[in-house]
Image (cartoon, rainbow, N blue to C red):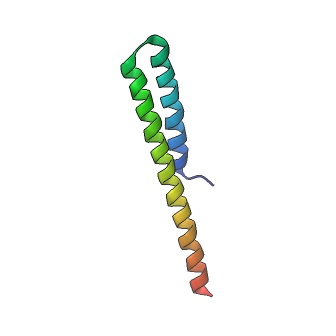
Amino acid sequence: MPNKDEIKGKAKQARGAVEQKAGEWTGDRDREAEGQAKRTEGRIQEKYGEVKRETGERVEEAGKKLKR
């Protein structure tokens, strides 16, 4: 199940894509670049969330094994 960082990262990517396209359509290079930066930031946040989730799952599994 995705955690909040994964969800927020996906949302940030979507907002960035919209902003990037709006910049392309209007010829606003600054807005286009900001959109691209938000998309990249969102990808990083999403990956951070994935690593955090996977690490937590592995720690949980290791804890279960130690209890045996």
Q: Which residue is drawn at 43% across and 34% down?
A: 38
Q: Is residue 11 above or below residue 54?
A: above
Viewer-closest of 52 and 67: 52
Q: Is residue 2 above or below residue 9?
A: below
Q: Where is residue 55 in the image (x, y as percent from the top left)?
A: 52, 65
Tell how many labels: 0
Q: Which residue is drawn at 57% across and 67% down?
A: 57
Viewer-closest of 6 and 26: 26
Q: In this view, does 43 lie above or below 50?
A: above
Drawn side of residue 34 relative to residue 4, left or right: left
Q: Where is residue 23 in the image (x, y as percent from the top left)?
A: 45, 18
Q: Position of residue 1 (x, y in %)?
A: 63, 55
Q: In this view, does 37 lie above or below 32?
A: below
Quadrant position of the C terminus in the picture: bottom right
> Which residue sits furthest bottom?
68
Viewer-closest of 1 and 16: 16
Drawn side of residue 39 relative to residue 65, left or right: left
Q: Position of residue 34 (x, y in %)?
A: 39, 28
Viewer-closest of 58 and 7: 58
Q: Which residue is drawn at 40% across and 15% down?
A: 28
> Which residue sits furthest left?
30
